[in-house]
Image (cartoon, rainbow, N blue to C red):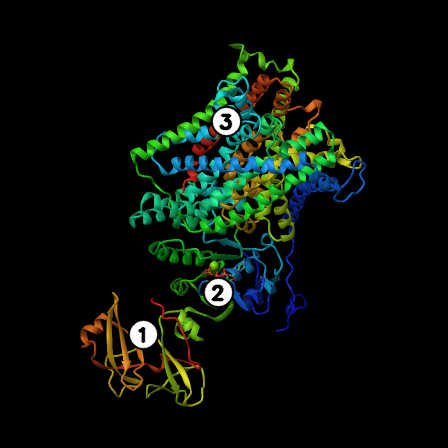
Amino acid sequence: MIETAALSPPLPGHVVKEKVSREDWIMRGVLLAIALFLTVSILLPLYSLMSKGFEDKDGNFTGLANFTEFFSTPALSYSILNSLTITLWTSAIVLILAFTFAYGLTRSCMPLKSLFKGIALVPILMPSLLPAIALVYFFGKQGIISSWLLGYELYGPIGIVMGECIYVFPHALTIMLIAMAMSDARLLEASEALGASKIKTFFTVTLPGMRYGLVSAFFVTFTLVITDFGVPKVLGGKYNVLATDVYKQVVGRQDFEMGAVVSMVLLVPAVLAFFADRIVQRKQVAMLSTRAVPYVPKPSKGYDMAMLGFCCLVGFIILSVLGMAFFASFIKFWPYNMTLGLDHYQFDLMDGGGWASYFNSIELASWTAVVGTIMIFIGAYLVEKSKGFKTGRNLMQFLCIIPMAVPGLALGLAYIFFFNHPDNPLGFLYHTMPILVICTVTHFYTVSHLTAVTALKQMDPEFESVSASLKVPFYKTFRRVTVPVCVPAILDISMYLFVNAMTTVSAVVFLYSPDTTLASVAVLNMDDAGDTAPAAAMGMMIVFTAAAVRLIHSVLTRGLARRTQAWRNR
Amino acid sequence: MCEGKPMADSGAYLKVENLTKKFGDFTALKDISLEIFEGEFVCFLGPSGCGKTTLLRAIAGLDIQTHGRVEQAGLDISGLPPSERNFGIVFQSYALFPNLTVNRNVAYGLENRKTPKPKIDAKVTELLQLVGLPEQGQKYPAQLSGGQQQRVALARALATSPGLLLLDEPLSALDAKVRARLRHEIKDLQLKVGVTTIMVTHDQEEALTMADRIVVMNEGIIEQVGTPEDIYSRPESPFVADFVGTMNFLTGTAAGNGNVKLDGVELAAIGATDSAADGNPITICIRPEDIVTRGVTKDTDNAVPAVVETLEFLGSFYRVTLHTQGPERTEFRADFSINLMRDLDFFEGGNVVVSLPADHIRVYGEAVTHSDEAV
Ligand SMILES: Nc1ncnc2c1ncn2[C@@H]1O[C@H](COP(=O)(O)OP(=O)(O)OP(=O)(O)O)[C@@H](O)[C@H]1O
Ligand SMILES: [Mg+2]
């Protein structure tokens, strides 16, 4: 039979072009909009920062002159060495402590495991300034146990390392716990069955099985410490590190160009650690593909007691740091008048923005949680589930990952250069609440994005295919199925964003204005002005708020689990 | 359902023409052409990785082909996204929405079409009745067994009355008993609804019992298309002969007139597909169950004297391994019923005469390597 013209045979070699449906256009549009947001909120500011490092005060290109100056000024370049010193010390100490703690929680039959885990996570609720302030009350000149330092000075490397250890402990612990939960019990059992001693099993099976977890924990600790600004700000004394240098150059000396140079130097180790961690993570995922059997420890009295003792000690240290900050904020006049009162909570009588700072912080955290969660979840959904459009999705994936590699101080400084530039049409955002929200969402974008991606990956990849075959547009399925199924992850993300927006100092310290002072910055400024007790009080306000949000989160999560258990249990 | 006759010339409802699918440098489908008629139940059968799913997804528009054309009901749908095609699909994972009840799952496609609520409810009830789950509408998927989930997925795919039903290994996640029952249920359902259906499977039994026609695939090409009877009795290639059922692959030589020689014994062969020159090596194929021994003497057509090597009891029959008595001692297997074994005196090492009936012998030109799979 004769074919009609419309149905002529296909030309060989003719590549079939997929028709892009209206829905695909919507997906691509939204994806591009979010990519555009990230371009403006991270890529362009970073570019401004970089170019600033190669300019003089008048904006003329000077090549490497600023860098030459940096490396030839010992006061500046020494900071690199100092930063590395405290970072490596902290990493070594925290890795050992967190490993042992995690080992106790997963590989022993000690009692009260969930209590200890809860205590260990407390420092997440604090701005890093707060443990540092608490240490002042312990080991400072008028501290209650200052003699324990055997005459060594708290202000300097010792204080910084102590403070950082408390600050990063929960982060390292979380990674260790995951790594331990993933390592395979069958290997341990096989080793024991072969008659290997406990010690030998530990060194030949446990430790090698944890190597990616350990390396990953090292990189996270490394990045957090080298970019942290709160602890060295309070406890650094004359000991300069890169993070405080950025602040000093910009806020103290108004030398923005040198600030840019130092923050670029700070960017290097952060970026290196970031990429190394990505590689390791990928390896770990590959190792994971076979299903691991979780280890069930057997009781062994002496060993369990030893583990309990260790966890008690660590838990006690963390709680006493929190407790010290708590009491210090109520004590009228340390150490002369030790009666309790609410004097230090009269923030309106002090510099730092008063109670308005606190409410600004709540506002910032709420906006960050709401706007950030919506944008990040939708972004992750589109990256994971949209069809075709490879370039767009790869670009987006890349943009989502960058924020993690950028230290907060560098981000904040980059925002000054970018948004405060006279030619920037977005300049009206400068010194407003929205810019703080944009900056904070961006700062914490990556971790939230990865959480969302993990949750989305666990969903059946064919939901979208099924709804397309039923001619239900993707956004309806997104609303009716994807979001309800992912509610736990969505709650996790919003809590993470809220708590971090409350506690962060590093990025926003360059961006607040008299109208948008923040609680965490108030802690910094009050401490700077010598009002240590009010600083502790404001820090405690942050802790109370973050703890309350965590509580609400766990109540919501639990209630939700009960309500949806009919369909969640498989 | 699809109204009106398809206007395509050959009358095929679905036409696949010169379809090629590449993943980077790897070609998963090589120039596939295929026609499927309205109301047919077609199975894509083949080993893992041969491209069955890829072909199904190209037909659905979920992973569009690199080259070639797909035509459904006379319309060229080659480049259309899935949402603009007319099909229902059931995945191996079922992909039921976990947070919606069975009712809401089945109604999912209807709710979007501005169908009035009472009508949706009636349709859902009818569909659940049809798949045999009338009382389960209020449950969530996680509260159902695998077989029940499978049927809900089927009901959901049928709810919008698609012109084409696509099933990707719908039964492979179920245990053997449920699988066997669902085979019949799905087949009955398909007959009742009359929807053109394509099912992907790597289970030959499934394909043989359910399909009107089977498409046997191998490494991105179609080896044979035919009825289950065709595929089983008249495999057109050694691959099909090997993949479907159990087959003896015996080395012989061509002997002229379509006859073949097996270890010196000349055999007539009707199913000879290749006319190799005399004396050339060829492969002689015969299924173990087609080998006859009751009443066979040296004078029976295609009689082959043999020696019993081993007897293996397989429940309903014995699998007997024999070898020819010539110099080559060609080994082959025959399936004999228990009944037969009781009547005849078989023992290991004993001499027997068997016949390889001419109409059951398939002959292939080249020497064939094949996997010796246990069935
Ligand atoms: N997205 C993809 N990218 C690259 N290669 C692919 C992709 N999807 C399939 N393939 C390859 O194409 C070939 C055919 O795959 P397909 O999934 O169609 O096999 P199948 O016949 O359905 O097998 P199974 O019975 O295991 O499901 C395989 O070799 C597979 O590795
Ligand atoms: Mg498949």
Q: Which mark is residue A552?
A: 3
Q: CA distance from mark 3 to mark 2?
A: 52 Å
Q: Residues within 10 Å of mark 2 (few under 14, many from 20)?
A: many
- Between A453 and A23, the one lying in front of the other is A453
Label 3 and label 2 in one chain = no
What chain does badge 2 belong to? B
Q: CA distance from mark 2 to mark 1?
A: 27 Å
Residue bearing the label numbered 1: B288
Task: Verify CB contact (< 8 Å) between mark 1 and mark 3.
Answer: no
- The x and y percentages for residue A384 are 57, 47
Would the CB of label 3 be found within 8 Å of ligand 1? no
Inspect this view and state whether residue A254 appears. Answer: yes
What chain does badge 1 belong to? B
Inspect this view and state whether residue B122 appears. Answer: no
Q: Residue at x 35, y 46 (%)?
A: A201
Q: Amino acid at mark 3?
A: Ile
Q: Amino acid at mark 2?
A: Cys
